[in-house]
Amino acid sequence: MKQWYEKLFENYGKKYDEEIFTKGTICECDFIEQEIKSNKTLKILDIGCGTGRHSIELTKRGYNVTGIDLSDSQLNRAMEKAALENLSIVFLKYDARNLPFKNEFDLAIMICEGAFPLMESDEMNYQILQSAANSLKSNGKIIFTTLNGLFPLFHSVKDFLASQNKEGNASYKNNTFDLLTFRDHNVTYFEDDSGNKNELICNERYYVPSEITWLLKSLHFKCIEIFGAKIGAFSRNDKLTTEDFEMLVVAEK
């Protein structure tokens, strides 16, 4: 049986690229470049690469990037876009919980909930972090965003998501946030690339900073820093607060 995130991305490449949260690619890649000091000898793994927006932009800047995703639709869209730019990028289909790489990459990125934290259990989400860690070299770094558990303690997730909706984009209704599991359950409505209307019952895991720190320490990351994640405006100057819907995590082995 396919999970909701698999169904969502079955035929949702072009429409995905129209979503408001995909519009910050340039500045997000600026931040990534700063974090690796523009060292173009480094190998980058883009986990949950989706339609390839970060992989493509970083490749255009001269970096060696491998993109992986579970969705054929998203990967096909990524390859189409790369071909239009005459870029040679390796895009591969893998489950982020079970990557085949060992000590191969200098940097792993998971931006805009790339795989983590969409899984149906905490153990599965942990497997994604574990797989990413295994893919990195001994001094490797990971940069990712995830849902900030401090936000729903002070705000309504339902109201926030409603404020982000634009005509033609996915919409979210019937949100219920479970304080025991830190999961938001909702019904997502969206139109796929063929114009079909779809409805999915979804749930996503929110994490508090101390959880993320503990998970990464258990995977032998030594330097772990967490910031507020503002779409298209990643910055070390943004201290994580209860106003941030997402957190930005930078960790180094």
Image: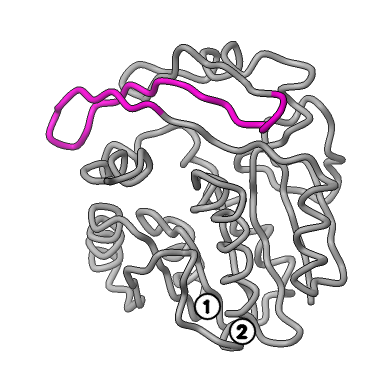
Q: In the figure, is residue 235 to the left or right of 96? A: right
28 lies above or below 162: below
* Numbered-mark total: 2
Decide which of 62, 14 is in the foreground and name it. Answer: 14
Local crowd size for mark 1, using a 10 Å CA cut-off: few (<14), some (14–19), many (≥20): some
Q: Which residues are magenta?
A: 179-201
Residue 176: quarter of image? top right
At a point 61% along the width and 88% down the height, the residue shown is 103
Residue 61: x percent and y percent?
A: 52, 71
Q: Secondary structure at mark 1?
A: loop
Residue 37: x percent and y percent?
A: 74, 74
Q: Which residue is mark 1?
A: 63
At a point 31% along the width and 39% down the height, the residue shown is 8
Q: Which residue is mark 2?
A: 42
74 lies above or below 209: below
Q: In the figure, is residue 81 to the left or right of 182? A: left
Q: Main secondary structure of the magenta part?
A: strand
- Magenta stretch encompasses residue 199: yes
The amino acid at mark 2 is Leu
Decide which of 185, 27 is in the foreground and name it. Answer: 185
The amino acid at mark 1 is Tyr
